[in-house]
Amino acid sequence: MEGDTATMTPAPRQQLSVTDGIFLTIGMVIGVGIFKAPSIVAGNTSGGIEFLLAWLLGGVVSLCGALVYAELSARHPETGGEYTFLAHGLGNGVAFLFAWSRMTVIQTGAIAAVAFVFGEYASEILRLGEHSVAIYAALSVVALTLLNLAGTLQSKTLQKVMEIALIAGLLFLAVAGMVVGSTPVPPKPAAAGSGGGDFLFAMMFVFFTFGGWNEAAYLAGEVREPRRNMLKILVGGIVAVTVLYLLVNIGYLVALGQGGVAGSKAVGADVMRLVAGDTGANILALIVCVSALTTINAAVFTGARTNFAMGRDFPLFAKLGNWRESGSTPANALVLQGAISLVLIVAAAMTVKDGFDAMVAYTAPVFWTFFLLTGITLFVFRYKSKDESEFKVPFYPVVPLIFCTMCGFMLWKALAYVFNPVYGPKFGNLVLAGLLVMLAGIPLYWFARKR
């Protein structure tokens, strides 16, 4: 059982080097978003310079956030991440609301979003009719939920191989785009509903693509000399990802032009098609598909275990806390998570044309709410305790203020889409749906607390 294990198991051994930490950080951040988000970012920025500045800003803010999470995890290294930070800093009610929102909006929405990217690139290889993308997305969630129910997990070796292949593929894509860029695609007008260049809307997708650095902060307990080396790992990992993303996006711009990137549904495949025809596009699509499946599987695995922990803490969700010995899996938590993800896929496919856009809109306000609250907990801990932690954010309070300010801006922007004449008809209901599901956790908490 997780609670007993956490009590009896000795502290993690500090055996990770700086190089190990940087490699792990890169692996946790890089995903399939870089093959989808650039099209949306290009459609909402005024030119190539602003387009690239958006990605640079994403790296800077992500680094600030990673440093905040590093200190939080050093102060409270227990299993649970944000759930633990919020419980210690802002109380059990906020922590419960986060766990509920992670189960119904944040994690399941992220699973659905990546599943839609898988569907778009799988459809490049073999289309399954008019709703090919949604069908592939649903099949991926069903298959990987069943895989986890059986207790079969992807091997660490395969994960590393895919990570190296993905990085190599991105570098090749960047160079290839620059090489073939002598005949760019003529610029296309911004797609209908793009708002003619909404920079903060573009940043939502940039930050989605940089997602994962919060997991990197959990390395603090296993890094040698963490006080000195965590800064090197976080800076090195985020800088490496930022440089890689900038190179890839420069390749996209040079090969397709701003309009070509904005008008592409599978920008990586379109660049590879220029380089090596349909064969090249299919090879890249296959790499993206495998990478997407790896990402979805990891999200299914970790998300179900968060739900399992909530089930153990709150009797109202006790069935989620049941562990099935056969396959050693939290079966009920997996089934519920898979069902919610499928509902989101179907709802997104029926509501808007692009399911990825829909899932980002659905998760954005809830995601930024808890990111902001987690950032605030650092100020609470600093106020309550002057004790030295294993790692401390440099340039306090400037770094956490930058992070919290950006979280506040993004939360405000997400909420503003409800009333936006351009985005409101397309995304307003999705934003409200995510918020209403989150707020439903408040009466649930009071009921759960009484029980």
Image: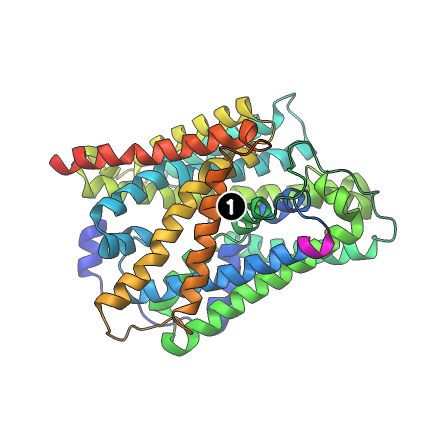
Which is nearer the eye, 439 or 215? 439
Q: Quadrant of residue 355?
A: top right
Q: Quadrant of residue 104?
A: top left
Residue positioned 54% across, 46% down in the render: 204
Residue 135 image point, x, y percent: 56, 26
Query: Range of the magenta residues?
Result: 47-51
- The residue sitting at the right extreme is 183
In-image side of 76 versus 168 (left or right): left
The answer to whether residue 32 is visible is: no
Amino acid type, label 1: Thr
| 212 in magenta | no
Residue positioned 41% across, 78% down in the render: 228
Which is nearer the eye, 290 or 216? 216
- Label 1 secondary element: helix
Residue 344 image point, x, y percent: 46, 29
The residue tagged 1 is 294
| 48 in magenta | yes
Residue 35 image point, x, y percent: 64, 46
In-image side of 356 versus 214 (left or right): right
Magenta part mainly helix, strand or loop? helix
**Number of numbered callouts drawn:** 1
Residue positioned 48% across, 24% down in the render: 347
Residue 357 image point, x, y percent: 56, 36
Residue positioned 39% across, 63% down in the render: 68
At label 1, counting other C-alpha atoms closer than 10 Å, the crowd grade (few under 14, some 14-19, many 20 or more) is many
In-image side of 98 versus 202 (left or right): left
